[in-house]
Image (cartoon, coloured by chain):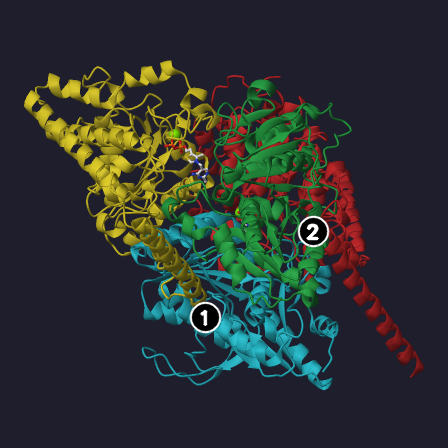
Chain colours: A yellow, B red, C green, D cyan
Amino acid sequence: MSLNVEHHSVRALPSEKPIRLLDNAGHAVRSAASGGFELPDLDTLLELYRRMVVARRFDVQVTALTKQGRLATYPSAYGQEACEIGAISAIEARDWFFPTYRDSIALLTRGIEPADILLSFRGDWHNGYDQYAHRCASQTTPLATQALHAVGLAHAARLRQDPIVTMTYLGDGATSEGDAHEAFNFAAVWQTPTVFLVQNNQFAISVPLARQTHAATLADKAVGYGMPGYHVDGNDVAAIYAVTRAAVDRARSGGGPTLIEGLTYRIEAHTNSDDPTRYRQARDVEHWKRRDPIERLEKYLVSEGALSEAARTEIADAAEAVAAHTRDVMTTEADLDPLELFDHVYERPRASLLEQRARLEAELADAATQAGHRNHAGAAR
Amino acid sequence: MSLNVEHHSVRALPSEKPIRLLDNAGHAVRSAASGGFELPDLDTLLELYRRMVVARRFDVQVTALTKQGRLATYPSAYGQEACEIGAISAIEARDWFFPTYRDSIALLTRGIEPADILLSFRGDWHNGYDQYAHRCASQTTPLATQALHAVGLAHAARLRQDPIVTMTYLGDGATSEGDAHEAFNFAAVWQTPTVFLVQNNQFAISVPLARQTHAATLADKAVGYGMPGYHVDGNDVAAIYAVTRAAVDRARSGGGPTLIEGLTYRIEAHTNSDDPTRYRQARDVEHWKRRDPIERLEKYLVSEGALSEAARTEIADAAEAVAAHTRDVMTTEADLDPLELFDHVYERPRASLLEQRARLEAELADAATQAGHRNHAGAAR
Amino acid sequence: MTATTTRLDAPAASAPTQLTMAGALNAALRDAMAADDRVVVYGEDVGPLGGVFRVTDGLQAQFGEDRIWDSPLAESGIIGTAVGMAMYGMRPVVEMQFDAFSYPAFEQMVSHVAKMRNRTKGRMTLPMVVRIPCAGAIGGVEHHSDSSEAYWTSTPGLTVVMPSNPADAYSMLREAIDSNDPVVFMEPKSRYWSKAALALPVITAPMDRAVVVREGTDVTLLAYGPTVRTALEAADAAEAEGLSIEVVDLRSLSPFDDETVGASVRKTSRAAVIHEAAQFGGYGAEVAARVTERNFHHLAAPVMRITGFDIPYPSPKLEEHYLPTPDRVLAALDTWEWDD
Amino acid sequence: MTATTTRLDAPAASAPTQLTMAGALNAALRDAMAADDRVVVYGEDVGPLGGVFRVTDGLQAQFGEDRIWDSPLAESGIIGTAVGMAMYGMRPVVEMQFDAFSYPAFEQMVSHVAKMRNRTKGRMTLPMVVRIPCAGAIGGVEHHSDSSEAYWTSTPGLTVVMPSNPADAYSMLREAIDSNDPVVFMEPKSRYWSKAALALPVITAPMDRAVVVREGTDVTLLAYGPTVRTALEAADAAEAEGLSIEVVDLRSLSPFDDETVGASVRKTSRAAVIHEAAQFGGYGAEVAARVTERNFHHLAAPVMRITGFDIPYPSPKLEEHYLPTPDRVLAALDTWEWDD
Ligand SMILES: Cc1ncc(C[n+]2csc(CCOP(=O)(O)OP(=O)(O)O)c2C)c(N)n1
Ligand SMILES: Cc1ncc(C[n+]2csc(CCOP(=O)(O)OP(=O)(O)O)c2C)c(N)n1
Ligand SMILES: [Mg+2]
Ligand SMILES: [Mg+2]
């Protein structure tokens, strides 16, 4: 395969009105606002509904656990379920996902165990799941850096004629970083099979979108790279799923990358250590709560007779089960071995690192002996 | 002054056909290709012609001196005179200019002494002219970094209600750097009075534009920042002048930044140490030589009767004088004081740096003594 | 150590009040902004939020958005524009949210901030301050506890300082803002909530000087930022065991105060440097090397480095094993041959 | 020192031919690409141009654009995509055109390249090589002569090596490409044109070992990359004056070969480290500190650092005054008290 195919660059302004397939009242949109995308079938929508409900219940549970001090930190995606779940549902098991700290619920949807997702936020180790088993890179904190990894992996796969797609999520704030630009540009120049989902939740911690960009939409950025860009209602899971799905298909068939902006809102604080009352109005949060992505889909499914009471109960139960399981695993303490600190720095351990390890080992042994003495003394008393 | 004015973001695709006011045959363009810009008046064009002729003669002279080993390196702008001279001529003395290594001839046009411009390329010191006297920052090598300086200075001036404009030049390759993105974005968000001129000479050293971007034009990048973008024939000094001039005026009156791409070609090697035969065809160079920016304007001026033989001779003589002066100053050796190395690192000299200085001073004294002995011995022999 | 003479241009000192280090830094910014309208502050979340550590709390309400504002989220952009603002004559004070998030700005820092005076033969200077909430020990998840000081100290042209207490925090930040050269101003996050009674404006030792914060005769502990407390605690514990420890707070990492440190080391004949960063190539290497170079024949033992391990900074639950503690300091000193 | 046993998988060694260091590196890339199709090469100008120093000359013609290509001009993009390619199982070898142009990639290098194995408990490793034509002494204008090694060596998780001669250049680059960990491979530009007769494939000492390149009894000079020649020339000159100098080529900057260096220093009891970079916080600080820690009671004098000054790298006409020369090395050694 030669990569030197002539590709025509895409050169069109994304629609300024977000693409929408279901309106906030749960009605199917059949106007131009649909951008020519088809509403997914009811089975698909029901499955997206189930995933969102489970994801939200998990997210709420983890926030509660964090408030109880079981986790060091947790960046909630409450309110962003349509983006989080819709896009990840559009890729296949063979595809790769490059998430940020915000995207725990997408990882849950991807099938990763709660304990493995949350291990890092609990503070046991930096990353807790098997990246290769799930084809999910570690959740990334340095903003926009993971987007380049997604492009590189996609390019490697392409060189190997391996028809996979890579998907990465970025925040609105992260689009300001140089790495976002370089990732978009490398993807477009190399025509890698990569889908970029910008979750525009309108804030970067406390900084509102207007201080982040002067463009009408973040999807407009696609123009400068000659790739297709879509400005999508990020609280409409049907639209997010349909647009990302089309982008995934195009990427897989050699059509190159796509930039998708999902316009949404973060209902919770940035993380548990944030105080959002300092930078946003309660009424804005209320406004966005009334645009809830799950309720919207629920209304539609109910109106179509596709969500019975029984199904709703079954889904709620499934969500409760995930929450209960999450509580269970997060209220036990992991057994950590401090000496493992030295195990994964280099393939071949360095002599001087082994010296440092030996020193810590001796320290731990000393501490254990002293603790033993104390216990012994205590027992004797 | 509050900076919190509501600005509407500009949202339009730049024309894919470059804006042109004079075609290659030297005829005024009156079609849509002029993008609504007016041909500058004959006096202005004559002055631009003079500046370009002088600039080219200087450039050729410096390249020759470099081949003779008088300079460590010299990045020529031969062929890019329309961009180099047209844009810098659109700003005023009070405005600031942020050039790259490529832009020596723009500095010449700005009135900086040849010796001061070339001091750095000769290797005497990193930068040779007075930045404040000319309101020109140092020529910058780390690509795209100076664009951020231009934005920062513009913002500072704006905070001070000082109605100046900053202009910076970038190469096509430099637009791929994260700093270019951050500069465009900061400028647009802060609505700074900044004009970005991308000189698209179609190569970044050996790398052609197609490996640098997948966009139809580099001006398309403006869309993603919500700022106006113009794709201009970079060998048409009339167009470059008119478009940059309009951008400067808009910036000065609070209208924010503009991104302008000038499509041009570098006729010379990247620098004297480059071998362009490895990456481009002689026939391409020939093709672009036939689109020479100076000849084009000359044809027009002659056809308009605005360039007499006398004027042409006078301008050629002026150019020769600059070249002769450049030869003179560059064939004398500067008197360098190695101890000055320690003078400009910190405002207050550090004790340990003074120790190092003392050591070098002693070394130099020793060497001088020994040289004295040798001379003495030589004289005695 | 903490001379409390007032600045010439300053209002009379207020009555002492309890201030945290974060509060002292906030007061320093406030006073500097009030004293000089060329001082502007920007970065990520420094506006309405007041910074993720609240160091800029209330400043936007007081000074308005033209003096302190939230910038787009791009560190190279922040430093690069600050270079331009400083060229114009402003005195930007910008924040990098954590050490690791200064890395995107590395090129601007090394190729421009550090070099501008030199490149231009002193014609163009950059009076700017880069504040970096630094180091670890606050249970931060990955990338939130790096120690970046060695990157800055090995870059000629940068001045690098780190206060360890509220008084120094105030005084040194004022001095950094007044400096005509760029200053990397590192703020140990784990000390943000430490308190002291201060009468502002407080003026402590010049920011390029180290200070003996505890006198002793047997060993000199060289510490800075978060490890000053570690050293002081170790010294207190050692006293019980009859070991007299002198503690020097380096304060200025670049330049290094050879004079103060040398005097102490020549007195005690033993020295150890303590920092959180990994040992290999850490700032302690410079300290050990230069103290040895200058005082070799006074040293009874090699200068010891008591530092983090040569590994990436660990996750919250494991950081206690990584950080140098007073116990670890004492255990390390025990490994010397003490034949007195 | 230069064992010439052939690699098991390699064709029989060719007859020795004269090769420059640039040529040896080119051959190493060629052989590695031929041996393993996971090896891909990209960066700025590495394709048709063959690199600004011609290290990749002819490789695109031989292997095609899917194995070696010109990327967009963005260093963070180059390193960041290489991380992704390595995650997939490729072995990218990327080029940063000069030390100073690696700075835009600093965040990717420090926060990802160095940490990926650690973050993922060894599940995800990054077999990638970052080639950096490094250091000065070629008359380069500003930003073309930095020495960036200290930034990399103070970053846990990175392996940093620097060959000083064509044989090592070949052997160490092959080994770096074969490594499952990321390697910062620094190529001293001023030695690119140095020559040696080599029978390829040549295998020298393992890349994590220092090598005694000249035996002596009075002093150990510790050098790497461009300063190995400086040290050897100083040693030759000193011999005439009756001073016997041992020269160690460090080769591996991180890890540091304590064993080889320690043995030499314990033998001679005096050591000096030589590098081009500024002294303050330079790599020599680590060398001096650890050699002293481990061999204090064998040292007759403090480990000396003979380095560039603590200033930004000078312009071409002044660099001769900045660079450590053999004369400067000998003058420095003269400042020790020699009482034997
Ligand atoms: C390079 C870098 N700079 C700063 C930070 C600190 N930080 C963490 S999250 C955040 C805001 C990110 O906003 P956005 O990209 O919109 O994502 P969101 O949190 O809203 O999902 C900041 C500034 C970081 N993680 N990385
Ligand atoms: C950050 C950075 N990376 C790499 C280089 C090396 N370099 C110098 S010029 C150049 C090509 C620049 O191309 P372009 O921006 O198109 O400008 P031109 O030279 O064509 O005017 C490169 C790669 C550099 N100076 N800075
Ligand atoms: Mg956001
Ligand atoms: Mg170019």
Residue drawn at (37%, 33%), measured in percent from left and top? A171
Residue A21, image x, y percentages: 22, 23
Q: Looking at the picture, tell me which residue is in the foreground, D304 or C334.
A: C334
* Label 1 beta carbon within 8 A of ligand 2: no
Secondary structure under the numbered disc 2 in the rendered image = loop
Q: Is residue A175 left or right of residue D233?
A: left
- Position of residue A247 measured from the top left corner of the image (x, y, whole percent): 26, 37
Amino acid marked by disc 1: Asp
Percent coordinates x, y for residue C98 in the rendering: 49, 40
Query: On the picture, is A45 further left or further right than B372?
Result: left
C24 over B52 or under it: above or below? above
Q: Which quarter of the figure has residue C263?
A: bottom right
For mark 2, name the chain.
Answer: C
Is A361 drawn above or below residue A326 in the view shown?
Answer: below
Subunit that carries the residue with mark 1: D
Marker disc for residue C257: 2
Q: Amino acid at mark 2?
A: Asp
